[in-house]
């Protein structure tokens, strides 16, 4: 009779606090070898803290880690690597001006001389690429390859270091649907070869599609671990949030009114002279949400930047409420756009939506600090009024923790996004530009954000939505426009189109060819 294998990973009674905040409370979990184990939970549930303890970034206040049944002391990432653990972070840890090969061996060189290390690593890299369907050019410079390829480099780094256990933190947050599907094939190959994979995600479709078991965390505690085949998305969502959650967007049919946002023959070039938006025309009416679908990098970001006043266009026309606006950048910026009735939730909340080192109350005033109700006199701002405004927004948008004095970087991604959305929507704009509204946001916050966007539409406002999440585009939009290579490929009614039709347009087929 064969002896059953011990768990590849066993965490016993792990607890971790940061001051008064209990990030992990007495967490125990077993991950069996040769399986894909999902860990889900809302932002701030403690998932990343737990994995950071396993990878040696943090030390637990109490508890024990066992690898293959044996207790181990993981006091830093080097100890984790020595124990056979590799981690692929949500934000990649790559040197952008190094080649793929140089990134893979960085920190794992053999001996004093680099040339033999590179030669040895090249052969291993080619073998690993072939074995796990991780094909990538070893001589490509990282900054010249897409995010999907960069993620493969991170996985190769871990495998090159002999990782038997691989942790992936929100791995599809920056991937297209096709790249995500390829990642799942890679993970299936890893499982087939006996590797153990821990997948941290908030996307229930991914959990149901690829995992063998799933553990649910809520507010720093482990709620349950179940076989994936014996659960469903509705049950998991309720376990994550602690209440019933709608997994679809509930909205009445749109009642479009007059045109509020009109774009005609817009052309945009980037700093290198590349033509990013090509002769694009689009109209968004009062009382409707128009979603722009497309694979990231096809001009959507540049379009939002021009509309938001952050980038100049070469030619074209932009009108809001029938009034022509400047697109050259000489008379326009984010401030003038806000005065013209445009609010903007940018795609990258860290770089463009927040100043992470500033407190919550300061962030909710950014861009609107000149409002009369925030002014004490011609010189000073009324900080008390701004703080009161922040308190009200935090309560209305259920920002956790409701602490206006907390720096923005100390909120989870979903609560950071709520701060940005509250700041923009509560100014009652005529037009809302919203990019990647739920990127890195948990399921409970997604439901809330979608409700706020629909509520704005129902007030007769125009909403232009950009998202790489096709499910989000199809469920939230009333009308869908598809961009490819800077061009508008066609428009579809969200009620009558499907993923296949939109996918063909996203791949560059004309509307006629797609039909």
Image (cartoon, rainbow, N blue to C red):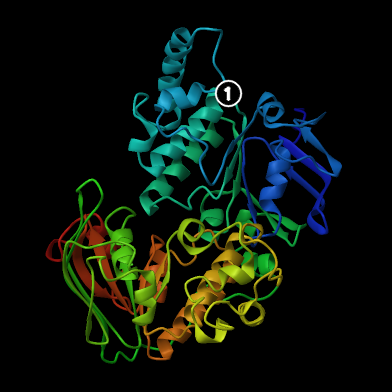
Q: Is residue 297 above or below residue 194?
A: below
Residue 422: image x %, image y %? 54, 76
Mark 1 element type: loop
Q: Residue at x 23, y 57 (%)?
A: 484
Query: Pointer 1: residues within 10 angstroms few (<14), some, or many (20+)?
Result: some
Q: Is residue 133 above or below residue 287?
A: above
Q: Is residue 429 above or below residue 235?
A: below
Residue 299: image x %, image y %? 27, 58
Residue 249 visible, this orientation: no
User: Looking at the rendering, in which quadrant would you find the N terminus?
Assistant: top right
Residue 452 visible, this orientation: yes
The residue where tag 1 is placed is 161
Q: Is residue 250 above or below residue 115?
A: below
Judge left or right: residue 477 versus residue 171. left
Q: How many marks?
A: 1
User: Looking at the rendering, in which quadrant would you find the C terminus?
Assistant: bottom left
For the residue pair 387 and 306, the one nearer the viewer reads as 387
Q: Residue at x 30, y 89 (%)?
A: 256
Q: Residue at x 76, y 58 (%)?
A: 220
For the residue pair 243 and 377, the one nearer the viewer reads as 377
For the residue pair 174 and 391, the one nearer the viewer reads as 391
Judge left or right: residue 209 versus residue 146. right
Judge left or right: residue 374 versus residue 425. right
For the residue pair 127 and 6, the one nearer the viewer reads as 127
Residue 513: image x %, image y %? 13, 61
Q: Quadrant of residue 341?
A: bottom left
């Amino acid at each position: 009779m064969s002896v059953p294998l011990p768990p590849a990973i066993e965490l016993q009674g792990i607890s971790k606090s940061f001051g008064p905040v209990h990030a992990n409370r007495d967490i125990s979990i077993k991950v069996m070898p040769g399986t894909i184990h999902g860990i889900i939970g809302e932002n701030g549930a403690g998932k990343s803290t737990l994995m950071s303890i396993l990878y040696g970034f943090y030390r637990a206040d109490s508890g024990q880690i066992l690898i293959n049944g044996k207790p181990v002391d993981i006091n830093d990432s080097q100890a984790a690597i020595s124990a056979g653990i590799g981690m692929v972070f949500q934000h990649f840890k790559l040197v952008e001006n190094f080649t793929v090969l140089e990134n893979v061996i960085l920190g794992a060189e053999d001996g004093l001389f680099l040339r033999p290390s590179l030669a040895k690593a090249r052969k291993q890299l080619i073998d690993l690429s072939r074995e796990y369907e991780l094909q990538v050019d070893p001589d490509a410079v990282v900054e010249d390859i897409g995010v999907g390829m960069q993620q493969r480099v991170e996985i190769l780094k871990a495998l090159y270091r002999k990782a038997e256990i691989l942790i992936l933190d929100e791995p599809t947050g920056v991937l297209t649907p096709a790249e995500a599907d390829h990642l799942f094939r890679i993970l299936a190959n890893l499982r087939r070869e006996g590797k153990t994979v821990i997948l941290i995600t908030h996307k229930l479709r991914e959990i149901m599609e690829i995992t063998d078991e799933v553990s649910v965390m809520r507010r720093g505690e482990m709620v349950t671990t179940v076989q994936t085949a014996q659960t469903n998305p509705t049950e998991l969502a309720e376990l994550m949030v602690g209440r019933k959650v709608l997994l679809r967007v509930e909205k009445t049919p749109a009642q479009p009114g007059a045109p509020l946002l009109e774009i005609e023959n817009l052309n945009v070039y980037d700093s290198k002279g590349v033509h990013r938006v090509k002769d694009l025309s689009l109209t968004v009416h009062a009382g409707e949400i128009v979603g722009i679908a497309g694979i990231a990098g096809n001009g959507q970001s540049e379009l939002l930047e021009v509309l938001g006043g952050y980038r100049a266009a070469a030619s074209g026309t932009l009108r809001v409420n029938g009034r022509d606006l400047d697109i050259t950048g000489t008379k326009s910026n984010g401030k003038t756009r806000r005065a013209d009735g445009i609010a903007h939730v940018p795609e990258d909340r860290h770089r463009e939506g927040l100043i992470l080192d500033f407190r919550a109350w300061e962030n909710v005033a950014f861009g609107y600090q000149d409002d009369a109700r925030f002014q004490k006199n011609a010189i000073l701002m009324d900080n008390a009024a701004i703080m009161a405004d922040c308190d009200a927004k935090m309560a209305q948008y259920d920002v956790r923790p409701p602490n206006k004095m907390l720096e923005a970087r100390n909120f989870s991604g979903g609560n950071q996004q709520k701060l940005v959305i509250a700041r923009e929507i509560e100014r009652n704009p005529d037009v809302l530009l919203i990019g990647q509204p739920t990127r890195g946001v948990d399921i409970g916050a997604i439901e809330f954000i979608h409700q706020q966007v629909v509520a704005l539409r129902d007030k007769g406002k125009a909403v232009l939505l950009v998202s790489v999440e096709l499910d989000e585009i199809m469920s939230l939009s009333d009308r869908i426009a598809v961009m490819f290579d800077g061009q508008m490929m066609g428009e579809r009614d969200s009620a009558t189109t499907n993923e296949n039709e939109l996918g063909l347009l996203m791949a560059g087929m004309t509307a006629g060819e797609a039909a």
